[in-house]
Amino acid sequence: MSEQPSRGRIAVASFIGTAIEFYDFYIYGTAAVLVFGKLFFPAYSDTAGTLAALATFAVGFIARPLGAILFGHFGDRIGRKQMLIASLLVMGLSTVAIGLVPPYASIGVAAPLLLVLLRFGQGIGLGGEWGGAVLLATEYAPPGKRGLYSAFPQLGPAVGFVLGNAMFLALNAGMSKEAFESWGWRVPFLASAVLLVVGYYIRMKIAETPVFQAAAAAKAPDRVPFVELLRRQPGVLVLATLSFILAHTTFYTVTTFCVSYGTTNLHIPRGTMLTGAIVAAAVMGLATLWFAQISDRVGRRYMCMGAAVLAALWAFPLFALIQTRSAIGVGVAMVVGLLVFALLYGPMGAYLPELFRVRYRYSGASFAYSASGIVGGGISPLVATDLLAKTGSTTWVSVYLIGIALVCLVSLMALRETKDADFTDGLSAARV
């Protein structure tokens, strides 16, 4: 039997990668809103440039399902650990390279092309990261603690977002607008190299999960796990994907679209919007941990359904508070928005893996998470920006959010509760 690592070791190994990878992913979104339109799409108007920059942001979400299939395939065949290391390297190296891309003024059309290519690399890496990290945590969890353990990697997005935006906030405050647009925006991307080295070292120290080892010892892995997933649980895969769209939509509406809307349309100071987003993300991190733990007692499904209802109810107050242009109004709007997100996201760390069988769990959880991001994270900010540009109002953006919330609610109603489900498929981890 392999030695059982301590809870702290599992927590750090599953958390550090998601924190780094979401830091990498989110700083792109912030830079896309603040400077990419002007630097890489200068021929467009401000609105069109922002849309073009957000379109390159969406490329990462389109690449995620491909990364999920790729890393899920090998993660279900040869193990979780190796794929977590590989996804970290793909994501980190792509991010550092983005910080080195010259602007359009220097190399012309090659600049946005390189940006899109590297953004695609980010998406491939993150497509394999989340599923592997939550499996590392949940497949080591003792009975009745999967929600708690799944919260470790679930804290990564909050920490990565706070770290990335705090860096942008400091740069914004410490240099002129000209310097920031010239070279300052590159600092967060280049700094990812340091985080990459730290994450790689920590992940090399963790062993393969006992649940995967038991499954591999009992039966040879499927030749193509994703095909087996489509044969055995196609309905669950579709419903799981649809149920998670709301999480991405809520998060990126609050942290990407609202920042763009506040700074560009309402002329709220950039610092006010970034500060509001940072405070909201910090609260979100603590709430994610709390909600994940609660789900071990009350179940995942009803908590997620409650989040869908609250998201619909908050769709109009969210923008009404931002339109006050006050720091307090902006802060409350973003904090409540991300609390709703945490209510859904916290339980989902355990819920998605629990829905799928061990032999294609990496593929199933990763694909559901990543495919939902195409609509929720990649398309939703574009839809919101386009609706705002066409109508001059956030009313239809709120209606769009309510529609996504209803899709989530209906999907969850069709899924089962998994809190007490057999997570090992009848295999004893003691056989390892």
Image: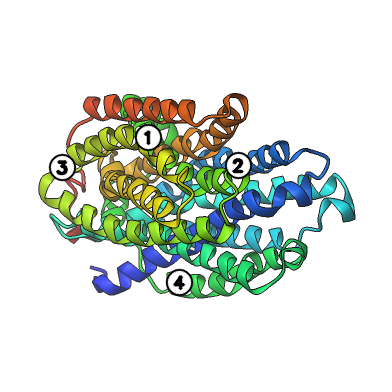
* Location of residue 327 in the rendering, given as x and y in whole percent from the top left corner: 45, 57
Q: Is residue 309 above or below residue 117?
A: above
* Residue identified by numbered label 4: 204
CB atoms of marks 1 and 3 within 8 Å: no
Q: Secondary structure at mark 2?
A: helix
Q: What is the CA distance from the residue labelled 3 to the residue labelled 4? A: 31 Å
Q: Residue at x 84, y 47 (%)?
A: 110
Image vertical order of residue 118 relative to residue 395, above or below: below
Query: What kind of residue is marked 3?
Result: Ala
Q: Pointers 2 and 4 in contact (CB under 8 A)?
A: no
Q: CA distance from mark 3 to mark 2?
A: 48 Å
Comparing 314 with 95, the one in front is: 314
Quadrant including the C terminus:
bottom left
**Spot occupied by residue 201 in the image (x, y as percentages of width and height):** 48, 75
Check disc 3 and report its element: helix, strand or loop. Answer: loop
Q: Where residue 26 sits in the image (x, y, percent)?
A: 54, 55
Residue, disc 1: 315
Residue indicated by mark 3: 421
Badge 4 element:
helix
* N-term-proximal mark, 3 vs 2: 2
Give the mark nearer the N terminus: 1 vs 3: 1
The N terminus - image quarter: bottom left
Q: Residues within 10 Å of mark 1 (few under 14, many from 20)?
A: many
> Within the image, what quadrant is residue 174 found in?
bottom right
The CA distance from mark 2 to mark 1 is: 19 Å
Badge 2 amino acid: Asn
Q: Where is residue 414 shown, x and y percent of the image? A: 24, 25
Dot label at residue 265: 2
Quick one: label 4, few (<14), some, or many (20+) residues within 10 Å?
few
